[in-house]
Amino acid sequence: MNELIKKAVALLESDSVQVIIGYAEGTGTRTRAIFITRTADCENLIFDSRCVQNLAVYLTKSEIKKLGKPAIVAPIPVLRSILQLAVENQITENDLVVLGITPQSELVDFESFAAIEAFLSTHQIVIEEKYQETIREIKAMPVTERFAYWVKELEPCFKCYACRAACPLCYCTRCTVDNNQPQWISVASHPLGNLEWHIMRAMHLAGRCTDCEACYNACPMSIPIHLLTKNMLQDVTENFGTYGPSLDKLNTLSSFKPDDKESFIR
Amino acid sequence: MSKIGVFICHCGENINATVDCARVAKTAGELEGVEYSIDYKYMCSDPGQTLIKQAIKEKGLTGVVVGSCSPRMHEPTFRKACQEAGLNPFMCEMANLREHCSWVHDKNEATTQKAIDLVRTLVEKVKLNKPLYSIKVPVTKTALVIGGGIAGIQASLDIANAGHQVILVEKDPSIGGHMSQLSETFPTLDCSQCILTPRMVEVAQHPNIKLLTYAELEKLEGSIGNFKATIRKKAKSIDENLCNGCGTCTTKCPTKKIPSEFNTGLGTRTAIYVPFPQAVPNKPVIDKENCSYYQKGKCKVCEKVCPTGAIRFDQEDELVEIEVGAVVIATGFNIMQPSEFPEYGYGKYKDVITGLQFERLASASGPTLGEIRRPSDGKIPEKIVFVACAGSRDPAKGIPYCSKICCMYTAKHAMLYQHKVHHGKSYIFYMDIRAAGKNYEEFVRRAIVDDEVNYIRGRVSKIYEENGKLIVRGVDTLLNAKPVEIEADMVVLASAAIANPGAEELAQKMHVSYDSYHFFSEAHPKLKPVETNTAGIFLAGACQAPKDIPETVSQASGAASKAIILFSKDELSRDPLIAVVNRSPAPVFSTCVGCFMCASACPYQAIGEELITNRQGKVIKKVAKVNPGLCQGCGTCVAFCRSKSIDIQGYSNEQMCAEVVALLNND
Amino acid sequence: MTEFEPKIIAFVCNWCTYAGADLTGTSRIKYAQNVKIVRFPCTGRIDFMLLLKSFGEGADGIIVSGCHPNDCHYTSGNFHARRRWIMFRGLLDMLGIDVRRIQYSWVSAAEGAKWADIVNSTVNTIRELGPYTEYEKVAGYLEKEAKQ
């Protein structure tokens, strides 16, 4: 990715940006996020198929914001998050330079968020068949069995909130789980607390989640919480039409159609 | 520490018959934070209220729970009592022990237990209540009236005569509406224009009325007392100040074959036109769609002949912002195009016309100067058939409701025809004759008896042309369903009255509700027939449902009086049960992260931005801010806020949570 | 053995269902005591977290009710609520939380009889389903901890 490094150097040298958010080699075969403020460090930038962490999460972090205007290495999941953050008024076009990366690992410039949206329209979110199958299997269980399944799946959760920390859309300064007036959900990592936390997390991502799987990748216990958001994405598509962040569309849950269809209200 | 007083009302025997009120009071008295608890026969009576007031003063109560009837009944009563005793009225809550308990359950242990649960729940809520203070909103004493038909005219004149400013917006080049198209009016047969045009002139000359014709509402923001309306003044292509209405341009305009809207297509007009001779204002507009200059770049005849140089081809639409305190919607109705009923042959046969077209034929100022001549060849029809309910009361193909005015105007049409064509024969196919109204039944009788109009009770199944005649096939249900066939020269369809196209869009712009037929909805079908669900917006005339003229005028005066009542005070007092965005110490300032999902969900555009700056004026944070003048307190934003940074006073997160916990923990 | 008495909490809007339930009262239509109402300004205000909290606090069933579509006192609160419920219901269903325990309904201020019917039929449904022991078991960890 010489081209990426060259671009990063140019951006820092011209002082167009003050920090490059990108990927670098981590421990073992893993990669990590890197925040480069000096041109000399740019050679550490890499990009390959191992780079799955969603760097967009750093765009809203005050520690990173302090470093100055960023350029961000943005493969498709990051682009989707950037667009959603734009819809939610968290970033503006002047706040950052986007170093887009196509699925063919080609560097691509984006002049505007609208350009990102145009690009993403040809790369729609697709829930992989294997996940669809898993979701179908879970839904096919009798309701008590399904509940038991999830209670068991969520049992290892010890509320480390890595899922929250990894999610680019969990940018609240105070999470409701940390609110004790009132105490909305039980903070302890017992079954009720775990269940409530994951329901709340999923609901807060309803109509917003861009299916980057950062939450699942971050979970030290590999709890399949991404199945909840994937299921939700399917529900959004099924009930309200196609899904994906869009600059001129309102968020799924903060908008409505008078003829939204449901079958359960008496 | 909370010092709550609990007051359990027997409501005579209404509550006490099934609920053990004494036990409810005793149990409530044992709840933590309850200082005083008592039951009494009638809490809402003077002695009952005195009981509450004394307890507030003597026990130093910080909150009150009255267990009695529905808060929708007596909440204002008890809050006022608290206020009189020096307790903030919003520190009083009511447990609904009557409508929700004693009246719906039998006398037993579970009923008393439920009453205890309800009281305990409200005690827990009231512990978290905070003193709130009414919000004062100044009132802009100007009314916006949308629609310049008889409803809008009447409402405007009433409000203006009460001394308030009115801005009357009309989408067409002239005010007058459908009433100006009518020939004579039932049940008196006085000429419609003769009674209407003086009113139109009065509007134009009234010092308190500003008339904006050829204009439409673009946007409405704000709320009762303080609306901001954006009006689109469509380009008329003339300078209204220079134009003196001489009419030279309209006579010289070479494009003359445009079907006249005013004459319902039965006459023509020019491209630069005044819709009808008595138009107000009597100044032309250029119809760009049909003007040679706008379409082909050549002509400009009007500009050449205009003696005052008033033509402005480069004029553009103009947006004007106005501030008003109240809005009267008077946008009227439309008629259903009978082409949706192919069996009637409307559109196929020139001599099958609508009732509104007949009005133009019968009108002295119409295309035939009041002579009934059929459109195809101008002959006077010898036999004429009127079809009532052409679309109305037809759930299958038309509209299920009754259009209300057709029975009367059809009788009038037949009568006018008989008066003008003495030897002619007229027939009316009808389902029922609905003539409820002052002198209405007598009017229909006159048509039948004096003018010998033939009423046939039955429906028309088909109309077709044969040998230059329109064959009307129907059935007479009063003669054992005998088939009837009439060879007519002309057929008039009483087509259904429907909502105006665009009514739905207009309703959404103003945030008022509308029914499934797209008529605007009144706030209450009986007791608030002129109000909408949005405070400060009122309804007049057929935009709410089909209406005749006297009904429309009464409603318009009703709507006007509502606006005048609103304008009678300088300030409005509003409930403080509104949303607020939290504040916290620096460096957080507020837990709001500014995603503004609340703003996009708010039905009232009440949520804006607030920039939090440091001492140097640098923006540190952008957060949501609720405009207390606009917020109506629905709380939709609260349920949206992921970080619980926005909350609603009186129904706060803490209060609602406390209620849930208290209600469910009764073991 | 005493019969199981379901604990049902009802979240209703002030303008339609609360008034509808008032009408049930003025019409003297009888219904089961199991349902107790919490008043909200609008269905738009009803946070899904409160529904979750209700199960955590031991509710066997929940009724959520407000104005019919197009009748919302605040024009669109119920439309927003409907979308939220569609999503929330889908999520709960995926998690195996029995969605039959939540009855959503539109009850207008004129539908006193409908309110009684909603209450009675919900009580019957929950009676058939029995106490929500699965959830209580999960929530039970709380109590055990508190006791220790």
Image (tube, rainbow, N blue to C red):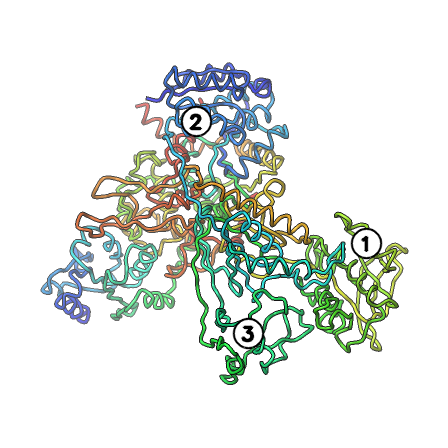
Please provide percent x and percent y for residue A262: 53, 49
* Front label number (3 vs 2): 3
> Callout 3: residue from which chain?
B
Q: Residue at x 35, y 48 (%)?
A: A225
Residue hosting label 3: B287
Can see residue B112? yes
Residue type of the residue flagged with mark 2:
Cys
Estimate the spatial distance between the alpha carbons at disc 3 and disc 2, rounded to whole Å.
Answer: 62 Å
Q: Is residue B614 above or below residue C49?
A: below
Q: How many marks?
A: 3
* Above/below status of B232 relative to C51: below
Which of the two residues, B315 or B19, is positioned nearer the viewer here?
B315
Q: Which residue corresponds to mark 1? A: B444
Measure the C-alpha gap from mark 1 to mark 2. Answer: 59 Å
Secondary structure beneath label 2 = strand
Task: Where is residue B612? Give x, y as percent.
Answer: 25, 48
Label 1–label 2 contact, CB within 8 A: no
Q: Is residue A264 visible?
A: no
Question: What is the x, y in percent for residue B143?
Answer: 50, 51
* Residues tagged by mark 3 and mark 1 found on one chain of the structure: yes
Q: Nearer the viewer, residue A204 or B361?
A: B361
Residue labelled with disc 2: B92
Dots 1 and 2 on the same chain: yes
Residue drawn at (81%, 73%), measured in percent from left and top?
Answer: B380
